[in-house]
Image (tube, grey):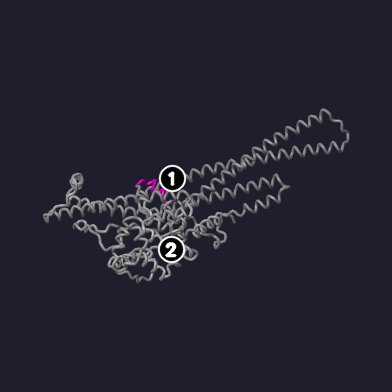
Amino acid sequence: KHGEAGDEKSVGPGFTKIFHKITAISKQVEGGMYLIKRVATVVHRLAQLEQAHVQQSKKALEQEKQKLKEKFVDEMTRCVDAWEGTEMYLTSQLSKREQLATKMEQQIAAPMLEFFNDSELKRKAIMKDEKKYGVEMNRAKLGVQKNLQNCQKLIKSCILAKSEEEEKKKGGRPIKKNKFGGVLKWAKNMMRGSLQDLQTQAASAAKNYIASIEYANERQKRYFGKELPLICKQFEMLERSRMNALYKYLNTLNSLSYEHADPIIKYIEAHKASVTSINPDLDVGDFAANIIRNYGDVPEIEPYTYQLSCQLKDIKAGRFEGNPNSFFFATLEHCMELQSGKRPNLDVPIIVVSMIEAIRKLGGFTVEGIFRLSAKKEDLVRLRKQFDQGIYTVKETSPHVPAGLLKQWLRELAEPLIPTEKYAEAIVIAKSKPGLQDVQDFAEKLPEINRNVLKHISSMAKEIAAQSSVNKMTFSNLAIVFAPGMLRNPSEDPHEMLENSKYETLFTKFLLQTG
């Protein structure tokens, strides 16, 4: 029952269930269309060769008939009859082969090529839409990042201006610097503007930042909720039509073969059996199920969140300082200073050790989707506030909470775990298919604290990946989660950011495996 529901128990999920792997879907559809083209080309070439062979054979047969006519001496009637019968048989066979070649061209090669051309136009149109949606998504992401950087820059200027204004009110004088340093500082202050101007600019920038987050979240919701599933559905329809076409024309080849090649019927039967096995429902289901088995279900989409250390009302009130006791939006060195009184012997920030230990105690290493699935926002806020208050004991019941906070802490570090100046070198290594020693040499050149944090996270990742058959988190899946906290592209070029993202994930995978 080709193309019908058949046995529903054996039919797997469709392409809309694996839209998080749109690249794999697109590659499959492109490869399928290429197969259609190749089959059409093979049939076309064989038909041409057969027609040429038939013409040459007819010419040779006619030449031999003419020679016999010119020098015919055999008077044995039975022999003559036998030859005339053979001549008719050969002529008939050549005519049938010529008819077969013509039908192969008209009923298979030409319509298949026409189908391929039409389908390619549809595929390219789908790809064009997917690329357009991807560009819009990336533009929204860049908008959030750009507005965040602008806010941080203005708030920093506000803090400096406010400090200088308070110094002037106290009657103090700034520390004198060399002549050229003083001139440069005076010029920067003049360009920066007054505290009131900066405060107004910071408030306006924060509004823009909030608006960009709202737009990005709405754009992301539309992309993953409507546009991408529609693209996948269109790809699936195209793939189904492609497989139905392949089924149709290969069976046409079988039918023509039955008409003109009775002696090779046993080979045709074997071929027919293989062609009959084509089933769009089963093939699409098997493909999608394989993707889910290797990469997991569609991950939960993480929304953009407000990341400034002060709120809009604080900016308007002139309060720009964040929490000086927070582990978040801080450097690794600052995190070590915060815990120096309570945990002086630790070689990494206490939040790393506490979160990993909590995940282990709560059985997180065997929980499906650990680090990929998000915790509740209120739980993360509560645990984050607890750490900012210097309370390092984790009393959560879900391993997703400490996992989510560890992931959040990494992404919010003032400087990424792999320092910005090392970013380009990391991408070069990822592109060069490195060996184990190359990655280890790179890690050894990192600052000591960075190297220690990487070792802790890598050790945890190895334990989790070792149980990927249960938790579905392979090194590849873990790399997707941790890459944003490991590496940050200093470039603002959308094309470069999109191109490098796969190498960021690949390099993170190498670090987790060898760190």
Q: Amino acid at mark 1?
A: Lys
**Mark 2 or mark 1: which is in front?**
2
Tell me which amino acid carries mark 2: Ser
Q: How many marks?
A: 2
The mark found on residue 393 in the picture is none
Q: Position of residue 453 (x, y in %)?
A: 38, 61
Residue position for label 2: 459
Q: Reading the chain from its start, which is encountered first: label 2 or label 1?
A: 1
The reply to whether residue 62 is in sight is: yes
Q: Which stretch is magenta?
A: 492-501
Q: CA distance from mark 2 to mark 1?
A: 42 Å
Q: For the N terminus, which image quadrant?
A: bottom right
Horizontal arrangement in the rendering, residue 74 relative to residue 269 (left or right): right
In-front residue for pair 9/392 = 392
* Side (left or right) of 205 relative to 87: left
- Counting from the top left corner in percent of width and height, residue 307 is at 30, 57
| Residue 298 in sight in this render | no
Label 2: how many Cα within 10 Å (few below 14, some 14–19, many 20+)? some
Kindly state the secondary structure of the residue where label 1 is placed.
Answer: helix
Question: Where does label 1 land, which residue?
Answer: 128
Percent position of residue 142, x then y: 34, 50
Residue closest to the eye, 222 or 178: 178
The structure residue drawn at horizontal position 72% and vertical position 38%, both measured from the top left corner, is 94
Q: Is residue 4 above or below residue 121?
A: below
The residue sitting at 37% across, 48% down in the picture is 136
Q: Residue furthest top?
A: 70
Q: Whole-percent x and y of residue 504?
A: 41, 52
Tag 2, which secondary structure? helix
Q: Is residue 260 above or below residue 415?
A: above
**Is-magenta flag for residue 322?**
no
Question: Is disc 1 surrounded by few (<14), some (14 to 19) or many (20+) residues within 10 Å?
Answer: few
